Image: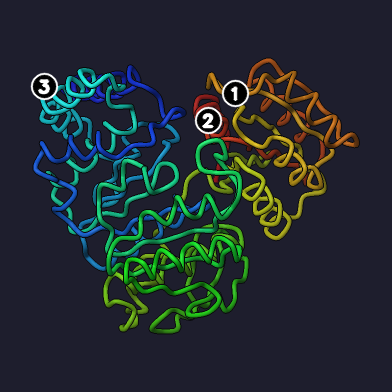
Amino acid sequence: MSNDDFVEAGQAVYDALLARIGEGEPNPRLHATRRAVELLGDPQRAYPIIHITGTNGKTSTSRIIESILRAYGLRTGLYTSPHLTRFNERIIIDGEPIGDQELAANWADIQPYIAMVDAELDADGQPKLTFFEVLTVLAFACFADAPVDVVVLEVGMGGEWDSTNVADGQVAVFTPISLDHTKRLGNTVAEIARTKSGIIKPAAAVVTAKQDPSAMAELVRATELTESTIVTQGEQFAVVSSTPGVGGQSLSIRGIAGSYDELFLPLLGEHQAQNAALAIAAVESFLGRGSQSLSIDILAEGLATSSSPGRLQVIGIEPTVLVDAAHNPAGAQVLAAAVSRNFHFDELSIVLGILADKDAAGIVRELAPLTGRIYTAQSASERAINYDDLAELVRSVAPAVTVIPCDTLEDAVESAREWSATAPLRAVLATGSITVISEVIEIATRNGWKAR
């Protein structure tokens, strides 16, 4: 078969998954995924796992952890969601998105077992396996087939009933927990933390960012019930210093077992420094249960080669265009602080698109101090808020901001670029949802924007 044939085969896998119940409608159950992996011989038990949940920073932290482990010479698997440009990005093996040939081959292998579980669920009057349930089973199979030495596993939503939780993580990592997906996870930070704490398995090493006290209480409770151990950012490990520089920042980190100075992280924002500290503590917990310091040279290599596309990423210059995946108020707050700290624009226009199940007003409140000009648009997602409706919301929340509704995302971002190009030190920021920034990145690629 030619490479083109494999590309088509890889696309066919994605198309088949899209025909199932979508990611926006997760089923709060584990038995269906557990039955599928059981029939496959439990591939998720073929490798140790670092399991990651939280509200913001999961993907960046996951990618940094994976990069450090790979620098140590381990063959890694990385499972994240959603993807930015290609579906294959969700299943990373040894630093590269899974190839279409391998994806298609593993898909063919699991099909009979997926069909069996679908039939059992159907006979029991339950919905068939969802997009995310099947994708998770596929990822476990791909990692076992590779094979890999360790898997960094990002939760899709929540924790306790998320499909990834059929796996047992030796290390459970928690990024900051805040309000998001409240219809499914709970209306308080404590309720959400309780659901997320479900990834803590017996005798696990728990590594957590600094949390709201109510969230921390839930994590401590779950740690005690499972006879696990817990270390907390700000207490057992911390960012000592972070200094912005060209293309990233210089860090000093106090880890659980060692101190690490003069590290370069090619990611912008104080929040990425915090993510790096969390990642380092997670790797210390995995490699030596927190009792052995990491090699400074290997750690430096792992951090220097880490990346997190779509997170305060410069995708165009002349004028500067930034994209960021902030999609809730906490993420928007972190984004606003990072832009203010790392860039010195005279004026910033924002291209904004938000999904209907998000706290749009909260996002706008956090972003409004950055700008006097917001272009509202909507991505191709069926969950996107209509651009006119979003414009009205922005006007009500931030009446001092000029609002320009645009009927396509491309019109919005090109209009913002034209405005920014008319004066020095103007820039564009596209944000509000991952679906927005993935489309803006595609627009930038297609139109040949100058980029770093």
Say which amino acid is labelled 2.
Thr
Residue at image coords 17%, 56%: 47
Q: Which residue is mark 3?
A: 1
Tell me: residue 32, above or below residue 426.
above
- Can I make out residue 70 in this image? no
Q: Which residue is mark 2?
A: 435
Q: Position of residue 129 (x, y in %)?
A: 28, 26
Please say which color scheme the image uses.
rainbow
Among all residues in the image, which is located at the extreme right? 400
The local secondary structure at tag 1 comes to loop
In primary-sequence order, the first of circles 1 and 3 is 3
Of circles 3 and 2, the one toward us is 2
- Tell me the crowding category of disc 1: few under 14, some 14 to 19, or many 20 or more residues within 10 angstroms, Cα based: many
Q: CA distance from mark 1 to mark 3?
A: 39 Å
Q: Position of residue 229 (x, y in %)?
A: 36, 74
In primary-sequence order, the first of circles 3 and 2 is 3
- Can I make out residue 267 in this image? yes
Specify whether 421 is left or right of 97: right
Of circles 2 and 1, the one toward us is 1
The local secondary structure at tag 2 comes to helix
Q: Which residue is mark 1?
A: 384
Say which amino acid is labelled 3.
Met
Q: Position of residue 424 (x, y in %)?
A: 79, 44
Is there a contact, CB below 8 Å, between mark 2 and mark 1?
A: yes
Say which amino acid is labelled 1.
Ala
Q: CA distance from mark 3 to mark 2?
A: 33 Å
In primary-sequence order, the first of circles 2 and 1 is 1
Q: Position of residue 11 (x, y in %)?
A: 28, 22
